[in-house]
Amino acid sequence: MILLLFAIAVTYIIPDQFEAEALKAFAEGLAEVSSFEDKEGQHYMAPLTTEDVCLRCHAAQGYSVGDVRGGISVTIPATDVRNRVNMYTIYSVISALLVMVLVVILIAYIARYFIRDIKQAEGKILEYAVTDFLTGVYNRGYGLQLLAQEVSRQRREFAC
């Protein structure tokens, strides 16, 4: 945190470009100034105004209540925040990919069992279509189908 004043005995603090522009904005009546620089970070600056308490010591210097006499500047570095955001982004992408892979594996595993069950059910349906489900003996429809196949085969053999 840096304390910047317009005209005081401490002259070794020189405002940077952001602080100089903020001090000009305070002189024009702006309440606070904030900006985000990608490399430097978040800058915030608020004005220091003269209050009644200040006039006890500074009335002789021509101060009046409400005068902007400087500002308080705070800079929060962005490198730590940017590094954390990058790290969390990488973790999020890796987590999403892992979840997607697990979902695909789970779907394939479940589908394998569904396909197996469907094939078993199809086999049972075909079996029930040609046999009597109580006795297990071939039914009339299957017998007629076999008879038609044999008649067709005999015709081919004796037709030559």
Image (cartoon, helix red, strand yellow):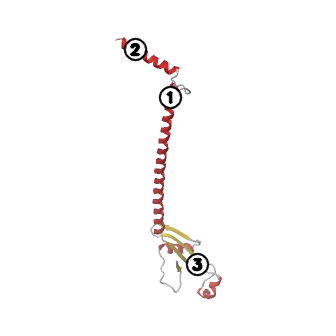
Helix, strand or loop under label 3: strand
Q: Earlier in the sequence, mark 1 or mark 2?
A: 1
Q: CA distance from mark 1 to mark 3?
A: 93 Å
Q: CA distance from mark 2 to mark 3?
A: 114 Å
| Mark 1: amino acid | Glu
* 54 vs 94, nearest the viewer: 94
- Please tell me how crowded label 3 is: few (under 14), some (14-19), or many (20+) other residues with Cα within 10 Å: some
- Please tell me how crowded label 2 is: few (under 14), some (14-19), or many (20+) other residues with Cα within 10 Å: few
Residue 154 is tagged as: 2
| Mark 3: amino acid | Leu
Q: Earlier in the sequence, mark 2 or mark 3?
A: 3
Residue at 50% from the left image edge and 28% from the top image edge = 127
Q: Farthest residue toward the right?
A: 52
Location of residue 29 (image quadrant): bottom right
Residue 59 x, y percent position in the rendering: 62, 86
* 122 vs 135, nearest the viewer: 135
Q: Farthest residue toward the top?
A: 159
Judging by the rendered image, the residue that carries numbered circle 3 is 48
Residue 146 vs 55, above or below: the answer is: above
**52 horizontally vs 142: left or right:** right
| Mark 2: amino acid | Gln
Q: Earlier in the sequence, mark 1 or mark 3?
A: 3
Which-is-in-front pick, marks 2 and 3? 2
Judging by the rendered image, the residue that carries numbered circle 1 is 127
* 112 vs 123, nearest the viewer: 123
